[in-house]
Image (cartoon, rainbow, N blue to C red):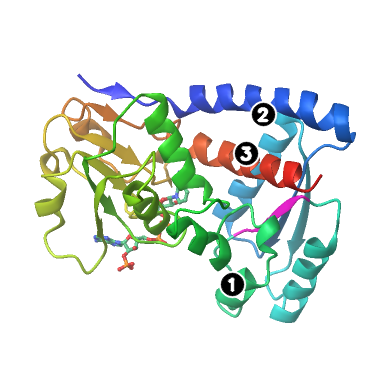
Amino acid sequence: MTQLLDGNLLAKEIKNKICKIIEKKILKKHKRIPHLGIILTGNNSSSITYVNNKIKECENIGIKSSLIHLPINTSEKELLEKIKGMNQNPHIDGFIVQLPLEKHLNQDKIILSINPKKDVDGFHPENFGKMALDMKAFFPATALGILTLLEKYKIQISGKYTVIIGRSRIVGRPISILMSRKNNPGNSTVTLTHSKTPNIEFYTKQADIIIVAVGIPGFLKGKMIKKGSIVIDVGIHSHEKKILGDVDFYSVYGKASYLTPVPGGVGPMTRVMLIKNTLIAALNNR
Ligand code: NAP
């Protein structure tokens, strides 16, 4: 039997805890609610949806959010000016620049310009490097959300064999670092696969845990996994008014021991982890 890992339920629990912390620790003492800044460039419909969801999440929890939506032809100089404004604004506790950026904008330069203390996405090399060195830092929200979900369901990762499909900076690579770190949670033996990995099935068939962040709907099929494995589906795809993941749900369901549904698995965990990072930034900032 496959048990679904309910990201909606856990995200709700975490939101309730965050609300209490805001009420007891922040509002009573500091009289100012945490504030997340968001910079969005262009008209990418997925990015607009993600940003709207983040703003809605802030409203639900009682965190302030400010959006700067810049036109598609915004120059790098103009974007860097907006980031400077967020860095210097004492009322902004943390902020994100929604990715991906338009092709004419240098993503590395943009990420490097964010003050690491306000980098609640955890993409700045200072935070990413600290994460890789087992130091305290802002961790990318999706990776943090996956770890939290595994922990909640008491799924042991130490000593297990984890295969990750996809090595993006925002999902695959950070989760590979966190799963394999010499820390708790961590201590998993990790194989990070990507588009140049021949015969991915060879790895997935041996894996105890499979994390799929490949960006191809239904990529992981039931025949690619061993019975009883734990499957985490990061993918999000809109298809004929339905949301699909990177896992072929119906062939994996029944064979895996645990599986994250899409929607309702990793997505809500990612959103709430961004809020958690903003709360930490707010506490650090007071
Ligand atoms: P991405 O930046 O496009 O990276 C995709 C990765 O998959 C790359 O490393 C790529 O390899 C690899 N890949 C592509 N085709 C492959 C193949 N045939 N076999 C093996 N590996 C292959 O994607 P991403 O940003 O990580 O996002 C992945 C998915 O997760 C998307 O559906 C996205 O919408 C979703 N997502 C969900 C959340 C959430 O909160 N649930 C958060 C972020 C992203 P190369 O490196 O060799 O190109």
Q: Residues within 10 Å of mark 1 (few under 14, many from 20)?
A: some
Q: Quadrant of ligand 1?
A: bottom left
The residue closer to the viewer here, 191 or 259, is: 191
* Of callouts 2 and 3, the N-terminal one: 2
Q: Residue at x 42, y 55 (%)?
A: 174
Mark 1 vs mark 2, foreground winner is 2
**Vertical side of 36 occupied by 43: above or below:** below
- x and y, in percent, of residue 41 in the image: 67, 65
Q: How many marks?
A: 3
Location of residue 30 by image quarter: top right
Magenta residues, start to end: 93-98
Q: Can you name the residue that lies furthest to the top here?
A: 1
Q: Residue at x 32, y 46 (%)?
A: 246
Location of residue 256 by image quarter: top left
- Please give the residue where the numbered disc 3 appears in the rendered image: 276
- Please give the residue where the numbered disc 1 appears in the rendered image: 102
Q: Amino acid at mark 2?
A: Ile
